[in-house]
Image (cartoon, grey):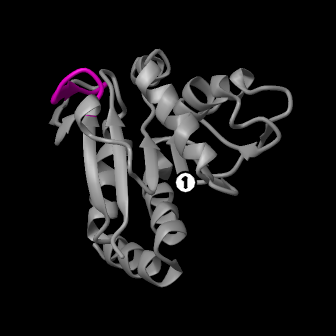
Amino acid sequence: MSKNAIVILAEGFEEIEAVTCIDVLRRANINVTAAGLSGTLVKGSHGITLAADKKLEQAGSDFDVLVLPGGMPGAANLAASDKVNTLIKKMNGEGKIIAAICAAPAVVLAPTGILNYKNATCSTGMQTNFDKTTKFKNERVVVDDNLITSRGPGTALSFALTIVEKLIGKELAQKIGTAALAG
């Protein structure tokens, strides 16, 4: 059975995090929808514009994993969206995987309350946004139940491979990781 992922791109997203996740998930034959928060052409935090597959309101809501890239002001733009917050709460309530990297765990997920009483990581210094019940872990990638959090651009490949491992399995994640690092 094929798996479906949505990666939401908001103005100011971190390009490495978004592109790495989209690429790795597609290599794993996961159906990925890159959804633009406010349109189909979305400019990242370093001036690179990506063409999203569709706008978020056209993307639907039947996904196995929600991926939230970081970057600023991308993460703040995601956090300000009622659509994004509704999707986070819906998918979390269904036990679906929610994966956030860089500023997104602290800026987008923490205010929703889904990180309360969970282990998580984020971009250095952003953990001050975590609720006092969230246990900050100084690790590259942290998995706690259906939540996957990661540090930033330098951990994007590990983050994406962890999503593949959680969705499909360790063997495929290792195969893709080995091929990606063979260079």
Q: Is residue 29 above or below residue 127?
A: below
Magenta span of residues: 36-45
Q: Which residue is mark 1?
A: 96
Residue 112, located in which quarter of the rendered image? top right
In the picture as drawn, the residue positioned furthest to the right comes out as 133
Residue 171 placed where, x, y %? 48, 84
Q: Label 1 amino acid? A: Lys
Horizontal arrangement in the rendering, residue 152 relative to residue 62 (left or right): right
Of the 4 image quadrants, the one containing the N terminus is bottom left
Horizontal arrangement in the rendering, residue 85 relative to residue 62 (left or right): right
What secondary structure is found at the residue carrying circle 1? Answer: loop
The secondary structure that most of the magenta stretch takes on is: loop
Residue at left offset 30%, top offset 26%: 37
Horizontal arrangement in the rendering, residue 6 relative to residue 104 (left or right): left
Residue 125, located in which quarter of the rendered image? top right
Task: Please tell me whether residue 140 belongs to the stretch shown in magenta.
Answer: no
